[in-house]
Image (tube, grey):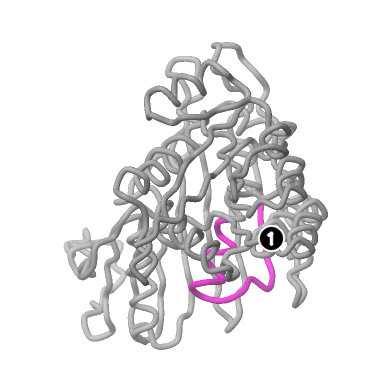
């Protein structure tokens, strides 16, 4: 048995997502559990090298998790380190230039999204990656959620008949920061720093919709800033220049209509922080982060509208839970493992930089729709 060790330059691991999901629950979990079985008796092992701007934080993380190396100097590491993979979880505004440097250095690329601040910048990354021949991937974590994995299973079984519509509800109340500290970094609410609900979430909705239901062909959207003033990590007030909510109608292949509400200014009255209801001619389903409930045609009740009498039916009790039937691990780790196997075997990763650019095109179309107050059609190539 041979162990193949892949050194990974991990940039941005002092941030919440970079640390919790990518470093702690993915790469370190893979390392500490002995790596990944390749299938021929060999194994893949990982060796993270931490990158960031704050030396004190990096040093503490390295000591806490027995990581041998860290640095604040990306250029030197790219020039001198024999790491095979570069991972980026920085703020969006810093991503493109760092990835381009890593591509020039011949590193395989795995990155959070948005992949860049514009479609043009994203296409620059796609062309550079294609020219270099590297394996490249973009985080598509929501496809690996247990709830959406179950939903995919339900779709592939033919349960729905013809799918008619999708309704998504996502978000929760992010505290303003005055009375209660905000639970998300302040840059998310400053457009000049790459913040904004449309930029953040439409990239997600694009890959969820196109991989489960069909490509987005047109969008009508309204982006708003519900909370105009927030307080930052130092307790200082600032003007929120980025949209904190977006309400959209997506028209998909097959005449499927998807309506998705995304908001950091909504209080949750549902089972999970994100839920998608899918309605079809033969049945419906509601999927969240972990669960998926279904109601087939033969179990669909026949309610009658009567405003003079209170409703006595417990509608939620009329749905059946889809069983796990398999063990679902952390979605971020699951995609990391798939990416590492693709790098090892020298094959393309299915969720690549081009997929990330399609998400950015939907972002552009959504923002244009909101600004211009009209429906925006997307071409076959996904460009508005």
The answer to whether one can see residue 373 in this image is no
Image quadrant in which the C terminus is located = bottom right
Q: Quadrant of residue 193?
A: top right
Image quadrant in which the N terminus is located = bottom left
Residue at x-position 63% and y-position 29%? 187
Residue at the extreme front: 1
Tell me if 193 is positioned left or right of 87 in this view.
right
The vertical placement of 312 against 67, above or below, is below
Residue at x-position 46% and y-position 42%? 47
The question of residue 218 being in magenta is answered with yes
Q: Start and end of the magenta stretch?
A: 204-222
Residue at x-position 42% and y-position 56%? 44
Q: Would you call the spot at circle 1 few (<14 residues within 10 Å), some (14-19), or many (20 or more)?
A: many
**Which residue is under mark 1?**
362
Q: Secondary structure at mark 1?
A: helix
Expressed as whole percent of the image width and height from the top left, the position of residue 66 reads: 38, 29
Q: Quadrant of residue 41?
A: bottom left
Expressed as whole percent of the image width and height from the top left, the position of residue 102 reads: 71, 46
Q: Quadrant of residue 74?
A: top right
């Amino acid at each position: 048995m041979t162990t193949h060790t892949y050194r990974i330059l991990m940039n941005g691991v002092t941030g919440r997502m970079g640390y919790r999901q990518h470093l702690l629950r993915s790469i370190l979990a893979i390392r500490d559990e002995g790596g990944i079985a390749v299938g021929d008796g060999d194994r893949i092992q990982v060796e993270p090298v931490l990158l960031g701007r704050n030396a004190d934080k990096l040093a503490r993380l390295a000591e806490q998790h027995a990581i041998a190396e860290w640095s604040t100097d990306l250029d030197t590491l790219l020039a001198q380190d024999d790491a095979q993979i570069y991972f980026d979880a920085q703020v969006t505004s810093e991503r493109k230039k760092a990835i381009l440097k890593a591509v020039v250095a011949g590193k395989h690329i795995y990155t959070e999204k948005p992949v860049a601040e514009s479609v043009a910048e994203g296409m620059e990354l796609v062309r550079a990656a294609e020219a270099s021949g590297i394996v490249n991937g973009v985080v598509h974590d929501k496809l690996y959620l247990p709830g959406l994995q179950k939903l995919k299973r339900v779709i592939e079984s033919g349960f729905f008949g013809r799918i008619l519509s999708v309704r998504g509800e996502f978000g929760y109340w992010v505290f303003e920061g005055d009375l209660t500290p905000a639970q998300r970094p302040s840059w998310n609410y400053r457009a000049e720093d790459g913040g904004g609900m449309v930029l953040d979430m439409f990239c997600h909705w694009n890959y969820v919709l196109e991989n489960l239901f069909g490509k987005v062909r047109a969008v009508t959207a309204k982006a708003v800033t519900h909370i105009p003033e927030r307080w930052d990590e130092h307790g200082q007030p600032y003007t929120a220049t980025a949209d904190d909510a977006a309400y959209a109608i997506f028209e998909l292949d097959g005449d499927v209509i998807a309506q998705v509400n995304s908001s950091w200014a909504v209080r949750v009255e549902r089972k999970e922080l994100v839920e998608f209801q899918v309605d079809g001619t033969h049945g419906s389903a509601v999927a969240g982060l972990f669960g998926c409930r279904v109601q087939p045609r033969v179990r669909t009740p026949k309610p009658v509208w009567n405003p003079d009498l209170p409703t006595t039916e417990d509608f939620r009790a009329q749905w059946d839970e889809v069983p796990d039937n398999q063990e679902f691990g952390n979605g971020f780790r699951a995609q990391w493992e798939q990416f590492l196997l693709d790098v090892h075997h020298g094959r393309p990763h299915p969720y690549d930089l081009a997929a990330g650019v399609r998400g950015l095109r939907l972002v552009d179309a959504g923002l244009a729709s909101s600004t211009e107050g009209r429906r925006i059609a997307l071409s076959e190539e996904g460009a508005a």
